[in-house]
Amino acid sequence: MILVIGGAASGKHAYVQGLGYTEAQMWDASSIADGRVEPLWGADPAEGFPVLLNLHALVFADPEGAPQFYEALLAKEVITCDEVGAGVIPATRTERDAREATGRLCNRLAAAAESVVRMSAGIPVVIKGK
Amino acid sequence: MKILLTGGSANGKSTYAEQLATSFAPPLYYLATMRPYGEESAARIERHKGMRAEKGFETVECDTGIGSFKPKKAATVLLECLCNLTANEMFDDEGKADEAAEGRILEGIGALEARCANLIVVTNDVGGGVNEQYNEGTRLYVETLGRLNAALAARFDVVCELVCGIPLVLKGKGLL
């Protein structure tokens, strides 16, 4: 699994396209917040899709439940996630919990990932693997 | 050796800091700066205490005035974290900011540096995002912590940013 992280609009999606994946192979968790899709709250939130975009949106939708998808997430080929831990600590408990849960899940995924790529202004910086 | 660890929240800074500290010879001190405000921070303190259990750290609660702490000779001190210490030194109970805090903190850390063999300081990268969205006190805090981070990074031997639990060495690559 390749974990692609970075700030909002830092070029993660374009990077995944550059790896050769089509839109039909990507399940976008940010569509949960938009109300466009319901997550598949089974064993795998994105069953049938090799790519999961915007993991943070899945965690923000359910900070306690999302980490339970760890095994299913490991089986994905590519996961992208916003780096949400920067900036001042949020004022609300819900946001703080979701931010912590996102960071902790990413730490576990990064430890198991073959490769971790951090996008910075559209430039992929490989911080683990090759 | 003086080491500064930075990065966003929940990026594995504490875990890595303890791993580095325990690689040095004892005595090991853990300077805890967090004030328990309510159940959430109490839970966080307990979690961090649990992580340190059996690792040989002596925990010293020190929410302000860290310059007065006198460790035993040749000690390794882990200060966690500069962000809490800065808030504690800066704001009174009414939330009024004291601009002299920055100088006091730098002095205190300087005193610690002179007294221990190894100092590891955990901080946080809070300068991302739109700073203008915050009130004056918070803006001042973000700027103060940013300047403190830069001042320590300039004189410390090693600076790492933690990203997803991965240490990215920004300074002093050959020393770790």
Image (tube, grey):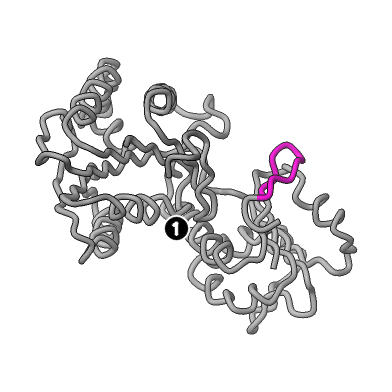
Q: Residue at x 53, y 76 (%)?
A: A68
| Residue B128 or residue B151, whichever sits in front | B151
Q: Position of residue A121 (x, y in %)?
A: 73, 36
The image quarter containing residue A31 is bottom right
Q: Mark 1 sits on what residue?
A: A97
Q: Which residue lies furthest to the front in this view?
A: B174
Q: Where is residue B15 in the image (x, y as percent from the top left)?
A: 38, 56
| Residue A75 or residue B54, whichever sits in front | B54
The image quarter containing residue B42 is bottom left
The chain containing the residue under callout 1 comes to A
Quadrant in which the N terminus of chain A appears: bottom right
| Residue B171 or residue B12, whichever sits in front | B171
User: What's drawn in magenta, residue-wise?
Assistant: A118-126
User: Is residue A10 found left or right of B92 in the rendered image?
Assistant: right
The image quarter containing residue A112 is bottom right
Q: Which residue is drawn at 37% across and 29% down?
A: B156
Q: Which residue is drawn at 48% across and 61% down?
A: A104
Residue B35 visible in the picture: no
Determine whether B157 is above or below B72 in the image: above
Q: Residue furthest bottom?
A: A43
Q: Total marks drawn?
A: 1
Is B21 included in the stretch rendered in magenta? Answer: no
| Residue A40 or residue A2, whichever sits in front | A2
Q: Main secondary structure of the magenta part?
A: strand
Is A119 included in the stretch rendered in magenta? Answer: yes
Amino acid on which the number 1 mark rests in the picture: Asp
Q: What element does badge 1 sit on?
A: helix
Q: Where is residue A86 in the image (x, y as percent from the top left)?
A: 52, 42
Determine whether B26 is above or below A105 in the image: above
User: Is residue A38 found left or right of B148 in the rendered image?
Assistant: right
Residue B72 visible in the picture: yes
Q: Position of residue B11 (x, y in %)?
A: 48, 52
